[in-house]
Image (spheres, rainbow, N blue to C red):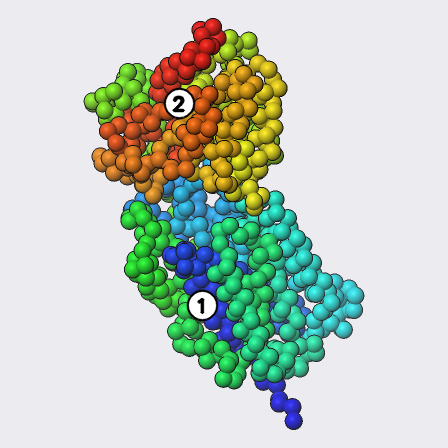
Amino acid sequence: MTAEPKLPRSVLPEVQALRAVAVLLVVAYHLAPQLVPGGFIGVDVFFAISGFLITGHLLREVRKTGRIDLPGFWAARVRRILPAAAVVIIAVLGATLAFLPATQWKAVGIAALAAAFSVENWVLAADSVDYLAADSAPTALNHFWSLGVEEQFYLVWPLLVLLAVWLGQMRYGRRETAGAFPRTALLLVFGTVVVASLAYSMALVGSGSPAAYFVTPARVWELAAGGLLALLLAPHEPGRRRNGRWFHAPGARTALAWAGFAAIATAAFGFDAATSFPGLSAALPVAGTLAVILAGETSGALAPQKILELPPVQWVGNVSYSLYLWHWPVLIFFLHFSGSEPDSAQGTGLLVLSLLLAGASHRWIETPVRTLAPLSSSKWRTLGAGAVVVALVTAMSLAPGTLAQRDTVAKEDAAATLLAEPPPELGAASIPDGAPPYLPGKKQIIPVPADAERDRPHLGECVQKPDSPFTRECAEGAEDGTLTIALVGDSHATHWYRALEATAKEHGWTLLTYLKNSCPFTATERIAEKNGSISCHQANSDTLKRIISRGDVDAVVTSHWAGAVLEKGAAEGFAEYWGKLEDAGIKVYPIVDTPRPGTKVFARDCVAQHPDDLESCGAPASRAFEPNDFTLAAAKREPRVGVLDFSDQFCVGGFCPAVIGNVLVYRDKHHISDTYMRTLAPVFGARLEAKLRADGLDDRVR
């Protein structure tokens, strides 16, 4: 005897449980990434769930009315998403002005504006392909990127459903499609989106573009896949009841559910930051999610249903949206106050705090506003209220940047006054006096911390991006200089540009540059080249050939960021290139890498917040230098090179300050500011000149 199919369920406990799994994976990944290295796939679980639920809602409306009430659909999204999101954005803006340094205000304001308009993912995508912006400190609103993807999907997806309905009506006529789905047209539209988006995602990931993680076209297939499942589970005939599942065998559903959870767990614990993602890798958590949904309600001794229906699991699923919204700001402000990653006890405390905020948000913000009679009874009133809230958040988002600009202008005026008649001991010139943070009677820091990020060589295309297949040659200085010298390497070679430029101008030299971010000048490949995010090996090889083939290069100055992770044989790789240059009669002067600040936050942020306690922003020399600087080891293998070590120009008495002689040493996490390099130019020039003379180039030095 065949069992009667169950009536459709209005509540799906397995979906709520999946939401709980998804949000806990994301939170765990942020609080303790070493425990769940692939916890970021929780976002992909959310995407698949959202695509399934939203598409199911749209299909039911099409079946019932033959159309979609777009204003009504979007109004429902506004009631569901906007209230809690707006409260979090406003709370972050207030906490930013109260607790964070002015150097971060503008960035948070931009993030708040992007979050309010659901485009944070595009802002982060733009930053991710900008080498300098990609190194910026995260804001407490960065996690809104995934909400941006979903909300853009909600904007476009119902239009695609309507397109499919129209195509079906064109093919079969309104009478034939009334009360039924134009299933073929829907399959065609949904399938096209899945295939095209997945292909684009794979291509973008394969190209090494970091923007692949954020951009909507590379992610929308995950939501569309959920939509496909909703379509496949929908009944074929109008008025026919079904339980929303393709089969009724309890054992098969149980096996499918456990297989789905296993796929999610495999991704969560098997993926990590080195995994090429999203692309095809994201198919594993998406498929796992859809398998659990397809399995539906399970039964039997081995079924997961009893676990999924546990009240704590269902509660976390209910508050998952608010938990996602609150956990990231909680972590970011903790990092600001503590200056270090949370340990296990602190991580547990942050989780508890996030859960409390999520529970309060769900109870007193999400639920009441979603069911508020004046809004739920009028789609136009809802949309109008949403527009007012977005306008309010927009106005508030502009405040941090405006206030920061006002503060910056005042400090820039003071800096201009100081630079109009610079004291002789400014910056590195104060090293002989013990590297005091402030000169007597001078309290202004230059560059102004809020402008420090821009205090760098603006060389345009002369500094190639990491994924560029080549390194550009540029020439500066005298066209027929007595000596031709080349600056070669990554961004840590670039930050020596001002010192070398000043020296070349003083002596009338020709200065060539071969600069490429993230690419140390070595025959050894970087680990990051494996995933295609950077392209160094061939570009470096071509640069070596070009320098040698020119025939007029007398010397090469090079340096590299010691934090770059290289394949085995790193020292040999540097020595190999240096040896080939020396064999060609070109002298090589590698520079020992510079120290890094001693704080988790950017040095400029620390300095802005602690102008009267600048020592707290520095670091002991014992931990200020990256351990993987291969300069000295490579020089032992190629002793013909002349190593330049300026560590004594950054550290005095075993301590490396963040501010020396009123000059901010660092413009970000580990790059030296142009202003400090200019003050270091006399010492740099003297030491380089001495090396050149010692190597028999007296007649070229002048």
Question: Nearer the observer, disc 2 or disc 1?
Answer: 2
The image quadrant where one finds the N terminus is bottom right
Let me know if residue 147 appears in the view: no
Taking the spot 24% from the left edge, 29% from the top edge, the residue there is: 653
The span from disc 2 to disc 1 (Cα, nearest Å) is: 56 Å
Q: Position of residue 563 (x, y in %)?
A: 42, 38
Front residue of 321/33: it is 33
Q: Secondary structure at mark 2?
A: loop
Q: Relative to residue 452, is residue 540 drawn left or right?
A: right
The image quadrant where one finds the C terminus is top left
Q: Earlier in the sequence, mark 2 or mark 1?
A: 1
Residue 20's label in the rendered image is: 1
Q: Position of residue 648 (x, y in %)?
A: 31, 25
Q: Position of residue 510 (x, y in %)?
A: 52, 14
Taking the spot 64% from the left edge, 48% from the top edge, the residue there is: 203
Q: Secondary structure at mark 1?
A: helix
Q: Relative to residue 418, is residue 467 drawn left or right?
A: right
Front residue of 50/252: it is 252
Front residue of 504/371: it is 504
The answer to whether 177 is drawn above or below residue 334 in the figure is below
**Residue 37 is drawn in which quadrant?**
bottom left
Mark 2 neighbour density, 10 Å: few (under 14) some (14–19) many (20 or more): many
Q: Position of residue 215 (x, y in %)?
A: 56, 49
The answer to whether 250 is drawn above or below residue 621 in the figure is below
Q: Relative to residue 449, is residue 575 drawn left or right?
A: right
Let me know if residue 299 appears in the view: yes
Look at label 1 and name its amino acid. Answer: Ala
Q: Farthest bottom residue?
A: 1
The answer to whether marks 2 and 1 mark residues whose Cβ atoms lie closer than 8 Å is no
Taking the spot 32% from the left edge, 36% from the top edge, the residue there is: 624
Front residue of 189/603: it is 603
Q: Mark 2 highlights which residue?
A: 644
